[in-house]
Image: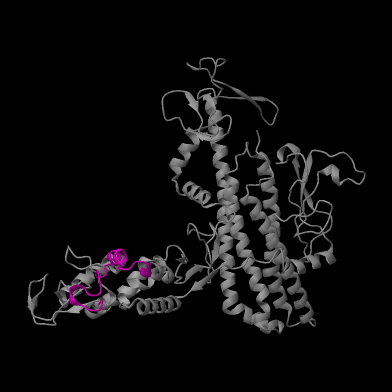
Amino acid sequence: MATATGDGGAISGRYKRCQTAGDLTEDGGDNTPDKRCRVALAGDDGETGGDTGDYYKINGDETDNDGGGEDLIYYYSDADEEDEAEVVGAASTTAIQPPEQRYVFLSEAAIRDRQIKATADVAEVLSVPHGFAAALLRHYKWRPTRLKEEWFSDANHRRIRHAVGLPPSPEANGVPFPVATALSREPLPCAICFGTFAAGETRSAACSSHFYCDECWRGYIRAAVDDGHGCLSLRCPDPSCSAAVAMELVDEVAAAADRARYEAFELRSFVDDSGGRIKWCPGRGCARAVEFLGDAAAEADVVCECAHAFCWSCGEEAHRPVSCATVRAWMRKNTSDSASATWVLANTKHCPKCRRPIEKNQGCNHMRCRAPCNHYFCWICLEPLGRGHTSCNGYRPQRQQQLNADGNVVVLTPEEQRQGQAKVSLDRYLYHYELWVANHKSLQEVLKDMAALERSELEKMAATVHTSAMDLRFLTKAYEQIAGCRRVLRWAYAYGYFLDPERDAAKRGLFDHLMNDANRSLERLHGCAEGERKRLCATANCAPYVAERYKSYKKKLGNLTEVTRHYFENLVKAFETDLAEVKPAK
Protein backbone atom coordinates (compact mmCIF):
# COMPACT_ATOMS: atom_id res chain seq x y z
CA MET A 1 0.00 0.00 0.00
CA ALA A 2 1.16 3.53 -0.64
CA THR A 3 1.86 5.36 2.62
CA ALA A 4 2.26 8.92 3.83
CA THR A 5 3.62 10.69 6.88
CA GLY A 6 1.27 10.87 9.84
CA ASP A 7 1.55 14.66 10.14
CA GLY A 8 -0.02 15.34 6.76
CA GLY A 9 3.31 15.56 4.90
CA ALA A 10 4.00 14.65 1.29
CA ILE A 11 1.71 12.02 -0.13
CA SER A 12 3.09 8.97 -1.92
CA GLY A 13 0.23 8.09 -4.26
CA ARG A 14 -3.41 8.49 -3.32
CA TYR A 15 -3.58 6.32 -0.24
CA LYS A 16 -2.53 7.83 3.06
CA ARG A 17 -1.90 6.69 6.59
CA CYS A 18 -4.47 8.20 8.91
CA GLN A 19 -4.69 8.50 12.64
CA THR A 20 -7.71 7.36 14.62
CA ALA A 21 -10.85 9.39 14.30
CA GLY A 22 -10.01 11.22 17.51
CA ASP A 23 -6.64 12.29 16.19
CA LEU A 24 -8.34 14.00 13.27
CA THR A 25 -10.37 16.38 15.40
CA GLU A 26 -9.31 20.00 15.49
CA ASP A 27 -9.61 20.33 19.25
CA GLY A 28 -7.22 17.46 19.92
CA GLY A 29 -10.00 15.34 21.37
CA ASP A 30 -9.49 11.90 22.80
CA ASN A 31 -8.59 9.13 20.43
CA THR A 32 -11.53 6.89 19.73
CA PRO A 33 -11.16 3.20 18.85
CA ASP A 34 -12.78 3.80 15.45
CA LYS A 35 -10.87 3.85 12.18
CA ARG A 36 -12.32 5.13 8.93
CA CYS A 37 -11.65 3.74 5.49
CA ARG A 38 -12.58 6.54 3.17
CA VAL A 39 -12.56 6.28 -0.61
CA ALA A 40 -13.08 9.43 -2.67
CA LEU A 41 -13.06 8.32 -6.27
CA ALA A 42 -12.33 10.41 -9.33
CA GLY A 43 -15.09 12.71 -10.47
CA ASP A 44 -16.75 12.72 -13.82
CA ASP A 45 -14.17 15.16 -15.17
CA GLY A 46 -11.29 12.81 -14.43
CA GLU A 47 -10.27 14.65 -11.26
CA THR A 48 -10.94 13.50 -7.74
CA GLY A 49 -13.91 15.04 -6.06
CA GLY A 50 -14.11 17.20 -2.99
CA ASP A 51 -14.49 16.12 0.60
CA THR A 52 -17.60 14.09 -0.12
CA GLY A 53 -16.23 10.56 -0.24
CA ASP A 54 -17.85 7.65 1.54
CA TYR A 55 -16.37 6.39 4.78
CA TYR A 56 -15.87 2.78 5.72
CA LYS A 57 -15.66 2.38 9.46
CA ILE A 58 -13.50 -0.30 11.12
CA ASN A 59 -13.74 -0.80 14.85
CA GLY A 60 -10.53 -0.61 16.81
CA ASP A 61 -10.65 -4.25 17.86
CA GLU A 62 -10.82 -5.29 14.21
CA THR A 63 -7.55 -3.68 13.18
CA ASP A 64 -4.11 -5.21 13.42
CA ASN A 65 -2.66 -2.55 15.69
CA ASP A 66 -0.24 -2.85 18.57
CA GLY A 67 -1.53 0.30 20.18
CA GLY A 68 1.08 2.76 19.00
CA GLY A 69 1.88 4.67 15.85
CA GLU A 70 -0.40 4.92 12.87
CA ASP A 71 -2.94 2.51 11.46
CA LEU A 72 -2.76 1.67 7.79
CA ILE A 73 -6.18 2.04 6.24
CA TYR A 74 -7.43 2.71 2.76
CA TYR A 75 -7.85 6.38 2.05
CA TYR A 76 -8.34 7.76 -1.42
CA SER A 77 -7.05 11.34 -1.73
CA ASP A 78 -9.63 14.15 -1.89
CA ALA A 79 -7.24 16.68 -3.44
CA ASP A 80 -8.80 19.55 -5.33
CA GLU A 81 -8.46 19.87 -9.09
CA GLU A 82 -5.14 21.75 -9.08
CA ASP A 83 -3.53 19.36 -6.62
CA GLU A 84 -5.00 16.46 -8.53
CA ALA A 85 -3.36 17.56 -11.76
CA GLU A 86 -0.03 17.80 -9.95
CA VAL A 87 -0.49 14.37 -8.39
CA VAL A 88 -1.35 12.77 -11.73
CA GLY A 89 1.56 14.49 -13.46
CA ALA A 90 4.04 13.47 -10.79
CA ALA A 91 2.66 9.97 -10.41
CA SER A 92 3.07 9.30 -14.11
CA THR A 93 6.80 9.08 -13.46
CA THR A 94 6.75 7.70 -9.90
CA ALA A 95 4.12 5.82 -7.93
CA ILE A 96 1.57 4.97 -10.57
CA GLN A 97 3.98 4.22 -13.35
CA PRO A 98 3.17 0.77 -14.78
CA PRO A 99 5.56 -1.95 -13.59
CA GLU A 100 8.68 -2.46 -15.66
CA GLN A 101 8.22 -5.24 -18.19
CA ARG A 102 10.60 -8.01 -17.22
CA TYR A 103 9.92 -10.33 -20.12
CA VAL A 104 10.28 -10.39 -23.89
CA PHE A 105 8.26 -12.15 -26.57
CA LEU A 106 9.85 -14.50 -29.10
CA SER A 107 8.33 -15.46 -32.41
CA GLU A 108 9.11 -18.82 -34.00
CA ALA A 109 11.55 -17.08 -36.35
CA ALA A 110 13.35 -15.47 -33.40
CA ILE A 111 13.51 -18.82 -31.58
CA ARG A 112 14.94 -20.54 -34.65
CA ASP A 113 17.52 -17.79 -35.08
CA ARG A 114 18.65 -18.11 -31.45
CA GLN A 115 18.76 -21.87 -31.77
CA ILE A 116 20.90 -21.82 -34.91
CA LYS A 117 23.35 -19.30 -33.46
CA ALA A 118 23.74 -21.20 -30.17
CA THR A 119 24.23 -24.53 -31.97
CA ALA A 120 26.80 -23.10 -34.37
CA ASP A 121 28.73 -21.47 -31.53
CA VAL A 122 28.88 -24.65 -29.44
CA ALA A 123 29.79 -26.80 -32.46
CA GLU A 124 32.71 -24.51 -33.25
CA VAL A 125 34.00 -24.19 -29.70
CA LEU A 126 33.72 -27.90 -28.83
CA SER A 127 34.64 -29.17 -32.32
CA VAL A 128 31.62 -31.44 -32.62
CA PRO A 129 28.99 -31.80 -35.36
CA HIS A 130 25.93 -29.56 -35.16
CA GLY A 131 23.71 -32.51 -34.25
CA PHE A 132 25.86 -33.30 -31.21
CA ALA A 133 25.95 -29.63 -30.26
CA ALA A 134 22.14 -29.49 -30.32
CA ALA A 135 21.94 -32.64 -28.16
CA LEU A 136 24.40 -31.15 -25.67
CA LEU A 137 22.46 -27.88 -25.51
CA ARG A 138 19.19 -29.70 -24.88
CA HIS A 139 20.85 -31.63 -22.05
CA TYR A 140 22.00 -28.34 -20.50
CA LYS A 141 18.61 -26.64 -21.03
CA TRP A 142 19.96 -24.45 -23.84
CA ARG A 143 22.51 -22.75 -21.56
CA PRO A 144 25.68 -22.50 -23.67
CA THR A 145 27.79 -20.94 -20.91
CA ARG A 146 27.08 -23.70 -18.44
CA LEU A 147 27.71 -26.36 -21.11
CA LYS A 148 31.12 -24.92 -21.99
CA GLU A 149 32.14 -24.62 -18.34
CA GLU A 150 31.35 -28.25 -17.55
CA TRP A 151 32.74 -29.54 -20.84
CA PHE A 152 36.17 -28.01 -20.28
CA SER A 153 36.22 -28.87 -16.57
CA ASP A 154 36.06 -32.60 -17.42
CA ALA A 155 39.16 -33.71 -19.33
CA ASN A 156 37.61 -36.86 -20.84
CA HIS A 157 34.00 -35.59 -20.95
CA ARG A 158 32.92 -39.14 -20.02
CA ARG A 159 29.93 -38.18 -17.93
CA ILE A 160 28.63 -35.66 -20.48
CA ARG A 161 29.24 -37.98 -23.46
CA HIS A 162 27.45 -40.87 -21.80
CA ALA A 163 24.45 -38.72 -20.86
CA VAL A 164 24.02 -37.40 -24.41
CA GLY A 165 25.07 -40.48 -26.41
CA LEU A 166 28.34 -39.23 -27.89
CA PRO A 167 31.23 -41.62 -28.60
CA PRO A 168 33.54 -42.18 -25.61
CA SER A 169 36.40 -40.34 -27.33
CA PRO A 170 37.14 -38.78 -30.73
CA GLU A 171 39.32 -41.75 -31.64
CA ALA A 172 36.68 -44.38 -30.89
CA ASN A 173 36.53 -47.16 -33.51
CA GLY A 174 39.32 -45.58 -35.47
CA VAL A 175 37.35 -42.42 -36.26
CA PRO A 176 39.71 -39.42 -35.81
CA PHE A 177 36.84 -36.93 -35.52
CA PRO A 178 33.37 -37.51 -34.01
CA VAL A 179 30.74 -37.99 -36.71
CA ALA A 180 26.95 -38.01 -36.49
CA THR A 181 26.63 -40.86 -39.03
CA ALA A 182 29.05 -43.11 -40.91
CA LEU A 183 28.69 -45.15 -44.11
CA SER A 184 29.88 -48.73 -44.26
CA ARG A 185 33.28 -49.24 -45.92
CA GLU A 186 32.53 -52.80 -47.05
CA PRO A 187 29.51 -54.95 -47.91
CA LEU A 188 27.47 -55.55 -44.74
CA PRO A 189 24.08 -57.04 -43.88
CA CYS A 190 21.43 -54.78 -42.37
CA ALA A 191 20.98 -55.74 -38.73
CA ILE A 192 17.20 -55.19 -38.98
CA CYS A 193 16.01 -56.63 -42.32
CA PHE A 194 19.14 -58.87 -42.73
CA GLY A 195 19.51 -57.92 -46.37
CA THR A 196 23.04 -57.68 -47.76
CA PHE A 197 24.13 -54.29 -49.07
CA ALA A 198 27.21 -53.05 -50.87
CA ALA A 199 29.74 -50.74 -49.29
CA GLY A 200 28.30 -47.29 -48.62
CA GLU A 201 24.68 -48.52 -48.70
CA THR A 202 24.32 -48.99 -44.95
CA ARG A 203 24.99 -46.41 -42.27
CA SER A 204 25.37 -46.16 -38.51
CA ALA A 205 24.60 -43.64 -35.80
CA ALA A 206 27.34 -41.95 -33.74
CA CYS A 207 28.72 -45.34 -32.67
CA SER A 208 30.04 -46.20 -36.18
CA SER A 209 29.52 -49.85 -35.21
CA HIS A 210 25.96 -50.90 -36.03
CA PHE A 211 24.91 -50.47 -39.64
CA TYR A 212 21.42 -50.48 -41.12
CA CYS A 213 19.99 -49.79 -44.56
CA ASP A 214 18.31 -46.47 -45.34
CA GLU A 215 14.85 -48.03 -45.54
CA CYS A 216 15.10 -49.51 -42.05
CA TRP A 217 16.47 -46.23 -40.71
CA ARG A 218 13.55 -44.43 -42.33
CA GLY A 219 10.99 -46.67 -40.62
CA TYR A 220 12.83 -46.45 -37.30
CA ILE A 221 12.82 -42.64 -37.38
CA ARG A 222 9.19 -42.49 -38.52
CA ALA A 223 8.12 -44.58 -35.52
CA ALA A 224 10.10 -42.32 -33.16
CA VAL A 225 8.63 -39.14 -34.65
CA ASP A 226 5.14 -40.59 -34.25
CA ASP A 227 5.85 -40.99 -30.52
CA GLY A 228 6.47 -37.24 -30.17
CA HIS A 229 9.15 -35.16 -28.49
CA GLY A 230 11.16 -38.23 -27.49
CA CYS A 231 12.48 -38.57 -31.04
CA LEU A 232 15.09 -35.93 -30.14
CA SER A 233 16.63 -38.42 -27.69
CA LEU A 234 16.61 -41.34 -30.13
CA ARG A 235 19.44 -43.85 -29.76
CA CYS A 236 20.97 -46.56 -31.93
CA PRO A 237 18.56 -49.45 -32.69
CA ASP A 238 21.02 -51.94 -31.20
CA PRO A 239 19.79 -52.65 -27.63
CA SER A 240 23.32 -52.60 -26.22
CA CYS A 241 24.28 -49.28 -27.82
CA SER A 242 23.45 -45.82 -26.47
CA ALA A 243 24.82 -43.78 -29.38
CA ALA A 244 22.70 -40.78 -30.30
CA VAL A 245 20.77 -40.48 -33.55
CA ALA A 246 21.67 -36.90 -34.49
CA MET A 247 19.86 -34.52 -36.81
CA GLU A 248 22.40 -35.14 -39.63
CA LEU A 249 21.31 -38.76 -39.82
CA VAL A 250 17.65 -37.73 -39.81
CA ASP A 251 18.29 -35.29 -42.65
CA GLU A 252 19.97 -38.03 -44.70
CA VAL A 253 17.39 -40.82 -44.48
CA ALA A 254 14.03 -39.55 -43.13
CA ALA A 255 11.07 -38.81 -45.37
CA ALA A 256 10.23 -35.15 -45.99
CA ALA A 257 7.16 -35.21 -43.70
CA ASP A 258 9.14 -36.86 -40.91
CA ARG A 259 11.97 -34.33 -41.28
CA ALA A 260 9.49 -31.47 -40.98
CA ARG A 261 7.99 -32.92 -37.81
CA TYR A 262 11.45 -33.57 -36.36
CA GLU A 263 12.42 -29.94 -37.05
CA ALA A 264 9.23 -28.78 -35.34
CA PHE A 265 10.10 -30.81 -32.23
CA GLU A 266 13.63 -29.41 -32.41
CA LEU A 267 12.27 -25.87 -32.51
CA ARG A 268 9.93 -26.44 -29.58
CA SER A 269 12.73 -27.98 -27.53
CA PHE A 270 14.31 -24.54 -27.22
CA VAL A 271 11.31 -23.60 -25.07
CA ASP A 272 10.20 -26.97 -23.67
CA ASP A 273 13.73 -27.92 -22.54
CA SER A 274 14.70 -24.47 -21.23
CA GLY A 275 14.08 -25.39 -17.61
CA GLY A 276 11.21 -22.92 -17.21
CA ARG A 277 13.14 -19.83 -18.33
CA ILE A 278 11.05 -19.64 -21.50
CA LYS A 279 7.40 -20.67 -21.83
CA TRP A 280 4.87 -20.80 -24.63
CA CYS A 281 1.96 -18.43 -24.48
CA PRO A 282 -1.12 -20.58 -23.74
CA GLY A 283 -3.38 -18.21 -25.69
CA ARG A 284 -5.52 -19.81 -28.38
CA GLY A 285 -3.70 -19.85 -31.71
CA CYS A 286 -0.66 -17.98 -30.35
CA ALA A 287 2.78 -19.29 -31.36
CA ARG A 288 4.83 -16.82 -29.30
CA ALA A 289 7.12 -17.72 -26.43
CA VAL A 290 7.85 -15.57 -23.39
CA GLU A 291 11.27 -15.24 -21.81
CA PHE A 292 11.76 -13.68 -18.39
CA LEU A 293 14.68 -11.29 -18.07
CA GLY A 294 16.40 -12.37 -14.88
CA ASP A 295 14.72 -14.55 -12.29
CA ALA A 296 11.06 -15.19 -12.94
CA ALA A 297 8.83 -13.95 -10.13
CA ALA A 298 6.43 -16.43 -8.56
CA GLU A 299 2.83 -16.03 -9.70
CA ALA A 300 3.74 -13.11 -11.96
CA ASP A 301 1.14 -12.11 -14.53
CA VAL A 302 2.21 -11.94 -18.18
CA VAL A 303 0.22 -10.20 -20.91
CA CYS A 304 1.22 -11.52 -24.31
CA GLU A 305 1.18 -9.52 -27.53
CA CYS A 306 -1.86 -11.56 -28.54
CA ALA A 307 -3.69 -9.92 -25.55
CA HIS A 308 -3.87 -13.20 -23.60
CA ALA A 309 -2.86 -12.78 -19.95
CA PHE A 310 -1.60 -15.76 -17.97
CA CYS A 311 0.15 -16.61 -14.73
CA TRP A 312 3.82 -17.48 -15.18
CA SER A 313 3.75 -19.92 -12.28
CA CYS A 314 0.72 -22.10 -13.05
CA GLY A 315 -0.03 -21.23 -16.68
CA GLU A 316 -3.67 -20.46 -15.92
CA GLU A 317 -5.37 -17.20 -16.80
CA ALA A 318 -3.84 -14.21 -14.99
CA HIS A 319 -5.43 -14.22 -11.55
CA ARG A 320 -4.03 -11.48 -9.37
CA PRO A 321 -4.82 -10.80 -6.53
CA VAL A 322 -5.40 -14.45 -5.58
CA SER A 323 -2.75 -17.16 -5.33
CA CYS A 324 -2.43 -20.19 -7.60
CA ALA A 325 -3.68 -22.36 -4.72
CA THR A 326 -6.84 -20.26 -4.44
CA VAL A 327 -7.39 -20.54 -8.20
CA ARG A 328 -7.11 -24.33 -8.00
CA ALA A 329 -9.54 -24.46 -5.10
CA TRP A 330 -11.99 -22.17 -6.90
CA MET A 331 -11.80 -24.14 -10.16
CA ARG A 332 -12.32 -27.40 -8.30
CA LYS A 333 -15.37 -25.83 -6.75
CA ASN A 334 -16.68 -24.79 -10.17
CA THR A 335 -16.00 -28.09 -11.93
CA SER A 336 -17.54 -30.35 -9.28
CA ASP A 337 -20.87 -31.69 -10.44
CA SER A 338 -24.02 -30.25 -8.96
CA ALA A 339 -25.00 -33.45 -7.17
CA SER A 340 -21.70 -33.62 -5.30
CA ALA A 341 -21.81 -29.91 -4.45
CA THR A 342 -25.37 -30.25 -3.12
CA TRP A 343 -24.40 -33.29 -1.06
CA VAL A 344 -21.43 -31.51 0.49
CA LEU A 345 -23.54 -28.48 1.34
CA ALA A 346 -26.33 -30.59 2.82
CA ASN A 347 -24.24 -33.21 4.68
CA THR A 348 -21.49 -31.26 6.36
CA LYS A 349 -21.42 -29.12 9.48
CA HIS A 350 -19.28 -26.16 10.40
CA CYS A 351 -16.83 -26.36 13.26
CA PRO A 352 -18.44 -24.22 16.00
CA LYS A 353 -15.08 -22.53 16.68
CA CYS A 354 -13.36 -21.88 13.32
CA ARG A 355 -16.40 -22.35 11.03
CA ARG A 356 -14.65 -24.70 8.60
CA PRO A 357 -16.95 -27.32 7.00
CA ILE A 358 -16.48 -30.83 8.37
CA GLU A 359 -17.75 -34.22 7.17
CA LYS A 360 -18.07 -37.07 9.69
CA ASN A 361 -16.38 -40.03 8.00
CA GLN A 362 -16.37 -42.42 10.99
CA GLY A 363 -18.98 -43.67 13.44
CA CYS A 364 -17.86 -41.86 16.58
CA ASN A 365 -19.65 -38.59 17.37
CA HIS A 366 -16.60 -37.17 19.13
CA MET A 367 -15.08 -34.79 16.59
CA ARG A 368 -11.76 -32.95 16.53
CA CYS A 369 -11.27 -30.18 13.98
CA ARG A 370 -8.11 -30.09 11.91
CA ALA A 371 -5.03 -28.13 13.00
CA PRO A 372 -4.53 -25.38 13.94
CA CYS A 373 -8.05 -25.24 15.37
CA ASN A 374 -8.13 -28.69 17.08
CA HIS A 375 -11.50 -27.91 18.63
CA TYR A 376 -12.99 -31.00 20.36
CA PHE A 377 -16.78 -31.11 20.15
CA CYS A 378 -19.85 -33.31 19.84
CA TRP A 379 -21.17 -33.95 16.32
CA ILE A 380 -24.77 -34.17 17.52
CA CYS A 381 -25.13 -31.00 19.58
CA LEU A 382 -21.94 -29.14 18.53
CA GLU A 383 -21.15 -28.49 22.20
CA PRO A 384 -17.56 -28.78 23.52
CA LEU A 385 -16.68 -32.21 24.85
CA GLY A 386 -15.54 -32.43 28.43
CA ARG A 387 -16.78 -33.14 31.93
CA GLY A 388 -19.67 -30.74 31.47
CA HIS A 389 -20.98 -32.49 28.35
CA THR A 390 -24.04 -34.71 28.80
CA SER A 391 -25.04 -37.64 26.64
CA CYS A 392 -26.57 -36.87 23.22
CA ASN A 393 -27.83 -40.39 22.56
CA GLY A 394 -31.47 -40.65 21.65
CA TYR A 395 -33.65 -38.23 19.80
CA ARG A 396 -33.48 -34.88 21.52
CA PRO A 397 -34.23 -32.20 18.93
CA GLN A 398 -32.35 -29.01 19.72
CA ARG A 399 -34.52 -26.09 18.77
CA GLN A 400 -33.34 -22.63 17.96
CA GLN A 401 -35.70 -19.71 18.24
CA GLN A 402 -35.90 -17.07 15.50
CA LEU A 403 -38.33 -14.26 14.86
CA ASN A 404 -40.26 -13.92 11.62
CA ALA A 405 -41.38 -10.69 9.96
CA ASP A 406 -44.43 -10.50 12.25
CA GLY A 407 -42.32 -10.83 15.37
CA ASN A 408 -43.53 -14.34 16.14
CA VAL A 409 -41.16 -17.04 17.31
CA VAL A 410 -40.17 -19.60 14.66
CA VAL A 411 -38.78 -22.84 16.09
CA LEU A 412 -36.36 -24.74 13.85
CA THR A 413 -35.26 -28.32 14.26
CA PRO A 414 -31.57 -29.22 13.76
CA GLU A 415 -32.44 -30.66 10.35
CA GLU A 416 -34.12 -27.42 9.34
CA GLN A 417 -31.16 -25.46 10.61
CA ARG A 418 -28.77 -27.66 8.61
CA GLN A 419 -30.85 -27.29 5.48
CA GLY A 420 -30.96 -23.54 5.96
CA GLN A 421 -27.19 -23.46 6.41
CA ALA A 422 -26.75 -25.44 3.18
CA LYS A 423 -28.98 -23.02 1.32
CA VAL A 424 -27.07 -20.02 2.65
CA SER A 425 -23.77 -21.64 1.60
CA LEU A 426 -25.12 -22.37 -1.87
CA ASP A 427 -26.48 -18.84 -2.25
CA ARG A 428 -23.13 -17.40 -1.19
CA TYR A 429 -21.33 -19.50 -3.79
CA LEU A 430 -23.77 -18.57 -6.56
CA TYR A 431 -23.42 -14.88 -5.74
CA HIS A 432 -19.64 -14.94 -6.18
CA TYR A 433 -19.78 -17.30 -9.16
CA GLU A 434 -22.21 -15.11 -11.08
CA LEU A 435 -20.03 -12.03 -10.55
CA TRP A 436 -16.96 -14.04 -11.51
CA VAL A 437 -18.62 -15.06 -14.78
CA ALA A 438 -20.02 -11.57 -15.43
CA ASN A 439 -16.58 -9.99 -15.20
CA HIS A 440 -15.18 -12.66 -17.52
CA LYS A 441 -17.82 -11.84 -20.12
CA SER A 442 -17.09 -8.14 -19.73
CA LEU A 443 -13.39 -8.88 -20.20
CA GLN A 444 -14.10 -10.72 -23.44
CA GLU A 445 -16.07 -7.74 -24.73
CA VAL A 446 -13.22 -5.39 -23.83
CA LEU A 447 -10.75 -7.60 -25.72
CA LYS A 448 -13.04 -7.53 -28.76
CA ASP A 449 -13.18 -3.74 -28.58
CA MET A 450 -9.38 -3.61 -28.33
CA ALA A 451 -9.05 -5.78 -31.43
CA ALA A 452 -11.50 -3.54 -33.29
CA LEU A 453 -9.52 -0.47 -32.28
CA GLU A 454 -6.28 -1.92 -33.56
CA ARG A 455 -7.95 -3.15 -36.73
CA SER A 456 -9.72 -0.01 -37.93
CA GLU A 457 -11.33 2.15 -35.23
CA LEU A 458 -8.18 4.09 -34.36
CA GLU A 459 -7.64 5.08 -37.98
CA LYS A 460 -11.27 6.17 -38.30
CA MET A 461 -11.13 8.23 -35.11
CA ALA A 462 -7.81 9.79 -36.12
CA ALA A 463 -9.36 10.96 -39.39
CA THR A 464 -12.44 12.25 -37.59
CA VAL A 465 -10.64 14.36 -34.99
CA HIS A 466 -7.82 15.33 -37.35
CA THR A 467 -4.90 13.74 -35.55
CA SER A 468 -2.53 10.80 -36.03
CA ALA A 469 -3.19 7.24 -34.90
CA MET A 470 -0.06 7.41 -32.73
CA ASP A 471 -1.58 10.31 -30.82
CA LEU A 472 -4.46 7.99 -29.84
CA ARG A 473 -2.17 5.69 -27.90
CA PHE A 474 -3.80 6.99 -24.70
CA LEU A 475 -7.02 5.28 -25.79
CA THR A 476 -5.30 1.92 -26.24
CA LYS A 477 -3.72 2.29 -22.78
CA ALA A 478 -7.14 3.00 -21.31
CA TYR A 479 -8.57 -0.20 -22.78
CA GLU A 480 -5.57 -2.18 -21.59
CA GLN A 481 -6.18 -0.82 -18.11
CA ILE A 482 -9.87 -1.72 -18.31
CA ALA A 483 -9.00 -5.28 -19.31
CA GLY A 484 -6.54 -5.57 -16.42
CA CYS A 485 -9.11 -4.23 -13.97
CA ARG A 486 -11.70 -6.72 -15.18
CA ARG A 487 -9.28 -9.55 -14.48
CA VAL A 488 -8.63 -8.22 -10.98
CA LEU A 489 -12.34 -7.87 -10.21
CA ARG A 490 -13.07 -11.32 -11.58
CA TRP A 491 -10.60 -13.09 -9.32
CA ALA A 492 -11.26 -10.79 -6.38
CA TYR A 493 -14.69 -12.41 -6.14
CA ALA A 494 -13.00 -15.79 -5.78
CA TYR A 495 -11.04 -14.27 -2.89
CA GLY A 496 -14.28 -12.97 -1.40
CA TYR A 497 -15.89 -16.40 -1.55
CA PHE A 498 -13.22 -17.91 0.69
CA LEU A 499 -13.73 -15.25 3.38
CA ASP A 500 -15.67 -16.95 6.15
CA PRO A 501 -18.93 -15.06 6.82
CA GLU A 502 -18.44 -15.17 10.60
CA ARG A 503 -14.72 -15.50 11.25
CA ASP A 504 -13.83 -12.90 8.60
CA ALA A 505 -16.83 -10.61 9.10
CA ALA A 506 -14.68 -7.48 9.45
CA LYS A 507 -12.66 -8.32 6.36
CA ARG A 508 -15.85 -9.06 4.50
CA GLY A 509 -17.25 -5.65 5.28
CA LEU A 510 -14.10 -3.95 4.04
CA PHE A 511 -13.99 -6.22 0.98
CA ASP A 512 -17.54 -5.32 -0.04
CA HIS A 513 -16.84 -1.62 0.41
CA LEU A 514 -13.64 -1.71 -1.64
CA MET A 515 -15.22 -3.80 -4.39
CA ASN A 516 -18.12 -1.38 -4.62
CA ASP A 517 -15.73 1.54 -5.07
CA ALA A 518 -13.58 -0.43 -7.51
CA ASN A 519 -16.60 -1.21 -9.68
CA ARG A 520 -17.65 2.44 -9.69
CA SER A 521 -14.13 3.54 -10.60
CA LEU A 522 -13.90 1.04 -13.44
CA GLU A 523 -17.34 1.83 -14.82
CA ARG A 524 -16.43 5.53 -14.88
CA LEU A 525 -13.26 4.79 -16.85
CA HIS A 526 -15.03 2.37 -19.19
CA GLY A 527 -17.83 4.85 -19.81
CA CYS A 528 -15.35 7.57 -20.73
CA ALA A 529 -13.31 5.30 -23.00
CA GLU A 530 -16.32 3.93 -24.85
CA GLY A 531 -19.37 6.14 -24.50
CA GLU A 532 -17.72 9.56 -24.57
CA ARG A 533 -15.42 8.46 -27.38
CA LYS A 534 -18.38 7.52 -29.56
CA ARG A 535 -20.17 10.77 -28.76
CA LEU A 536 -17.03 12.75 -29.60
CA CYS A 537 -16.68 11.01 -32.96
CA ALA A 538 -20.40 11.35 -33.73
CA THR A 539 -20.40 15.13 -33.27
CA ALA A 540 -16.89 15.90 -34.52
CA ASN A 541 -17.93 16.75 -38.08
CA CYS A 542 -20.46 19.38 -37.03
CA ALA A 543 -18.73 20.78 -33.94
CA PRO A 544 -16.75 24.00 -34.41
CA TYR A 545 -14.31 23.27 -31.61
CA VAL A 546 -13.23 19.71 -32.37
CA ALA A 547 -9.59 20.29 -31.40
CA GLU A 548 -10.51 21.69 -27.99
CA ARG A 549 -13.03 18.95 -27.29
CA TYR A 550 -10.54 16.27 -28.31
CA LYS A 551 -7.85 17.82 -26.11
CA SER A 552 -10.24 17.90 -23.15
CA TYR A 553 -11.29 14.29 -23.77
CA LYS A 554 -7.68 13.14 -24.02
CA LYS A 555 -6.79 14.80 -20.73
CA LYS A 556 -9.82 13.42 -18.94
CA LEU A 557 -9.34 9.85 -20.15
CA GLY A 558 -5.63 9.98 -19.39
CA ASN A 559 -6.29 11.17 -15.84
CA LEU A 560 -8.98 8.55 -15.27
CA THR A 561 -6.65 5.83 -16.55
CA GLU A 562 -3.88 6.82 -14.15
CA VAL A 563 -6.23 7.25 -11.21
CA THR A 564 -7.86 3.87 -11.83
CA ARG A 565 -4.51 2.16 -12.28
CA HIS A 566 -3.27 3.46 -8.96
CA TYR A 567 -6.47 2.50 -7.17
CA PHE A 568 -6.35 -1.06 -8.50
CA GLU A 569 -2.64 -1.42 -7.75
CA ASN A 570 -3.37 -0.69 -4.10
CA LEU A 571 -6.46 -2.88 -4.19
CA VAL A 572 -4.39 -5.82 -5.43
CA LYS A 573 -1.77 -5.25 -2.72
CA ALA A 574 -4.50 -5.19 -0.09
CA PHE A 575 -6.00 -8.50 -1.21
CA GLU A 576 -2.61 -10.15 -1.71
CA THR A 577 -1.82 -9.38 1.94
CA ASP A 578 -5.25 -10.74 2.92
CA LEU A 579 -6.39 -7.35 4.21
CA ALA A 580 -3.70 -7.63 6.87
CA GLU A 581 -4.86 -4.48 8.68
CA VAL A 582 -8.04 -6.22 9.78
CA LYS A 583 -7.92 -8.90 12.47
CA PRO A 584 -10.15 -11.96 12.13
CA ALA A 585 -12.93 -12.31 14.65
CA LYS A 586 -12.03 -14.26 17.77
> Is 493 positioned to the left or the right of 276 in the image?
right
Does residue 507 lie above or below 466 as drawn? above
Please say whether residue 138 is one of the residues in the magenta stretch: no
Q: How many labels, in total? A: 0
Front residue (pair 273, 359): 273
Q: Quadrant of residue 251?
A: bottom left
Residue at 58 percent across and 62 percent down: it is: 443
Front residue (pair 145, 384): 145
- Residue 207 visible in the picture: yes
Instruction: Give the percent coordinates (x, y) of residue 94.
Output: 72, 66
> Is 524 positioned to the left or the right of 251 in the image?
right
Q: Which residues are magenta?
A: 151-178
> Is 194 positioned to the left or the right of 308 in the image?
left
Residue at 44 percent across and 41 percent down: it is: 340
> Is 430 positioned to the left or the right of 179 in the image?
right
Front residue (pair 570, 464): 570
- Residue 46 visible in the picture: no
Instruction: Give the percent coordinates (x, y) of residue 211.
Output: 14, 74
